[in-house]
Image: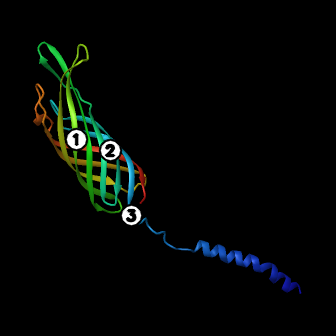
Amino acid sequence: MKKILWIILLIPSLASAQELDSLVTDTTEIEPPAYYLAVYVDAGASFEASAPESNFFSVLGIGAQYEKWMIGFYRYDFQGTSQSLVVFPNSFELKYRYAGVYLGYQFYQNELLNVSAGGSYNKGDAVWRSLEDGQDFLRDEFDLIKMRLKVEIGKIRYIKPHASIGYQKMRNLNLANLNESNFSGLFVAAGIRIGYFNQ
């Protein structure tokens, strides 16, 4: 009788132990997402052609990626200094910025790196600003087209450092002591995407 009683008491504990073992040894693979989606902010710096020489720009943008296609909206602000005697004997400082739409395609991916190519169309303006009173003296708008190759470290889930190299071409600038060739040429850039990436 005592043996039967012990068996009855041990049955629930054996059942729960078996259930726990099945949970521990469950090797069912998690299904990957049906599609790749990313939403992010992107910040960095660009070293590119400017007057009178290459200089740094701060870069800030927002973007999204669906599968291999990327689209973003970026703003570039000139961080260098350029002065000129636009109207003698007064000195003026050059200020300019531009912003535009970027479209890219990720054509290679492995466990560590993502490689993409893309281009952007940007609108901007350049201003000669008086050093004496801080007033804008001459201003003109321009178009800027940029093409780039970008390499990104894709291993980290929510942070994607990247670097790129490319070529840019300015058009439609008509401003004293400046020409489009001052702002056309090779550029290099680096930054970091921070956001939601579902893979």
Give the amino acid type for the residue marked by disc 2 in the picture: Gly
User: Does residue 126 appear in the picture of this structure?
Assistant: yes
Q: Earlier in the sequence, mark 2 or mark 1?
A: 1
Q: Residue at x 20, y 29 (%)?
A: 126
Element carrying mark 1? strand
Q: Residue furthest right?
A: 1
Q: Is 41 on the left or on the right of 102, as rendered? A: right
Q: Which residue is mark 2?
A: 191
The x and y percentages for residue 17 are: 69, 75
Q: Nearer the viewer, mark 2 or mark 3?
A: 3
Q: CA distance from mark 2 to mark 3?
A: 25 Å
Specify the quadrant of the image occupied by residue 94: top left
What number is the disc on residue 35? 3
Q: Residue at x 31, y 47 (%)?
A: 72
Q: Earlier in the sequence, mark 3 or mark 1?
A: 3
In this view, 177 is above or below 11: above
Q: CA distance from mark 2 to mark 1?
A: 19 Å
Frontmost residue, 49 versus 146: 146
Frontmost residue, 2 versus 124: 124
Q: Is 27 on the left or on the right of 92, as rendered? A: right
The x and y percentages for residue 14 are: 72, 78
Sort mark 1 into few (<14), some (14-19) or many (20+) by Cα contacts within 10 Å.
many
Specify the quadrant of the image occupied by residue 36: bottom left
What number is the disc on residue 122? 1
Specify the quadrant of the image occupied by residue 67: bottom left
